[in-house]
Image (tube, rainbow, N blue to C red):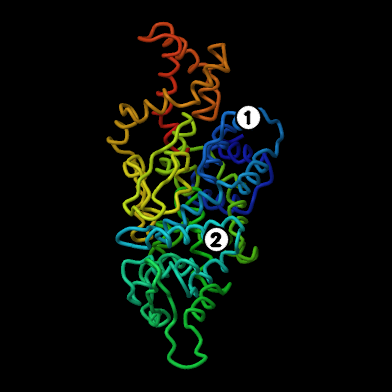
Amino acid sequence: MSRWLAVLVLPLSLGAQSRIDELVLDRLRQLNIQPAPLSTDAVFLRRAYLDTIGTLPTAVEARRFLEDRNPDKRRALIDALLEREEFADYWAMKWSDLLRVKAEFPINLWPNAARAYHHWILASIRENKPYDQFVRELLTASGSNFRDPAVNFYRALQSREPAAITQAVALTFMGTRTPQADLEAYFSRISYKQTGEWKEEIVFFKLNAPNERDPRAAFADWLIRPENPWFARNIVNRIWYWLLGRGIIHEPDDIRADNPPADPELLGYLQNELVAARYDLKHIFRLILNSHTYQLAFTGPENFASYHLRRLDAEVLADALCQVTGTGEEYTSAIPEPFAYIPASRRSISLPDGSISSPFLELFGRPPRDTGLESERNNRITAAQRLHLLNSTHVQRKLRQGTVMQAIFQNNKEPLAVVNEIYLTVLSRLPNPEELKAVGTYSQTGPVRGREALFDLAWALINSDEFLFRH
């Protein structure tokens, strides 16, 4: 059997090949690129949790999945993750990046409006609101920025000129940075009025004649039509980018004639699937996550022949550190009133306002939410980040004062059981024989013994690329 055929048979042995896989494999044949083998269960488990809900599996969840002999367990896991509360938290965070949910300068939503806006986004994702309805509500919203949260779309801008509004609309919902000039007319009569409430503002459409129709509604109706080439293409391309690390059109918010898709047929298929599913975004998530293309191992080739390696988002990494150590994070806000207090137990992916932050989030590239561009998020690893993880008292305190390692030592008396539990907690897998041998050698001949050696093990795993990256 040729290597090419063997690669194709491996994924097919785990289930029916999807249309996504047929299109990707056909493209790879044309390019004479061999796809990577399928990822292991341990790699898939961690990847699916991080990509779908921005959260690590617990040691219990990891052990349960790895020991499960159900051949359909990957599909079952995907279905379960799509219904988790963290799914709404994580994707509300992603949408809050695009929609610039931030109280402070230069967006200046102010705390009440930022929280109301985030709550509306979160509720929309939680109820799986159809995407065309979600966008139409944003584009046609009028009213108070406190009581009608969707109007904050028109306030979360650095400029309220029609050209700036049009650019934000085109970037967010069409994936283009250069909108047509004639679109400005649809947003030329948006007005803003203060009220007696602190920082409350009314957003409305300024009428020129009785019974005049809001031109924003006309634009929204044009945008969300099934035959519109911009709307569905943009969001399915973004979802592909979010899950696989690279858009079919890349960058995902730079769609233009001279930046063609890497696989036009694949993009067209996903567009049609979204329209046929009545703009149910979870349907697209499910299609991609269940594909063998998504479940391939990381080996390096592009053109979706391999999973794309990338560092964890700042918020996801902060939550992962808190989870594996049993600690919280301290947050601060540049806008002190109202509601400045954020409990340390709050997960970073669920923060309602981009102005609420921590030194860790700033160091690890959390986006400022100033422009709505995907490139605002910086997931490149830096020397300062490495030094923080290696040497900071912040990480050492979490590891030594947190409840998780203490519980592992108390609940597992045998050294092997402790080592297994540390690996399951931090890396969502069991150690391999070589790793067990290295741990044994270090604990017997290294500079420290016993529990101290196991603390060193946990610290080393937290500093590993396997912990820091999605792979």
Number of residues whose C-alpha sits closer than 10 Å to that of mark 2, classed few (under 14), some (14–19) or many (20 or more): some
Q: CA distance from mark 2 to mark 1?
A: 35 Å
Residue 178 visible somewhere in the drawing:
yes
Q: Earlier in the sequence, mark 2 or mark 1?
A: 1
Q: Which residue, given by chain and number where applicable, does mark 2 sit on? A: 265
**Residue at horizontal 43 percent and vertical 65 percent from the top:** 172
Q: Position of residue 301 (x, y in %)?
A: 45, 42
Q: Residue at x 38, y 9 (%)?
A: 446
Amino acid carrying label 1: it is Leu
Q: Where is residue 304 shown, x and y percent of the image? A: 49, 48
Q: Residues within 10 Å of mark 1 (few under 14, many from 20)?
A: some
Closer to us: 239 or 205: 205
Residue 93 x/y as whole percent: 46, 52
* Callout 2 secondary element: helix
Q: Position of residue 274 (x, y in %)?
A: 60, 62
- When the figure is inspected, residue 82 is found, relative to residue 205, above or below; the finding is above
| Res 66 label | 1
Question: Does residue 233 appear left or right of residue 163 in this picture?
Answer: right
- Dot 2 amino acid type: Glu
Residue at x 60%, y 55% (from the top left corner):
282
Relative side of 110 to 231, left or right: left
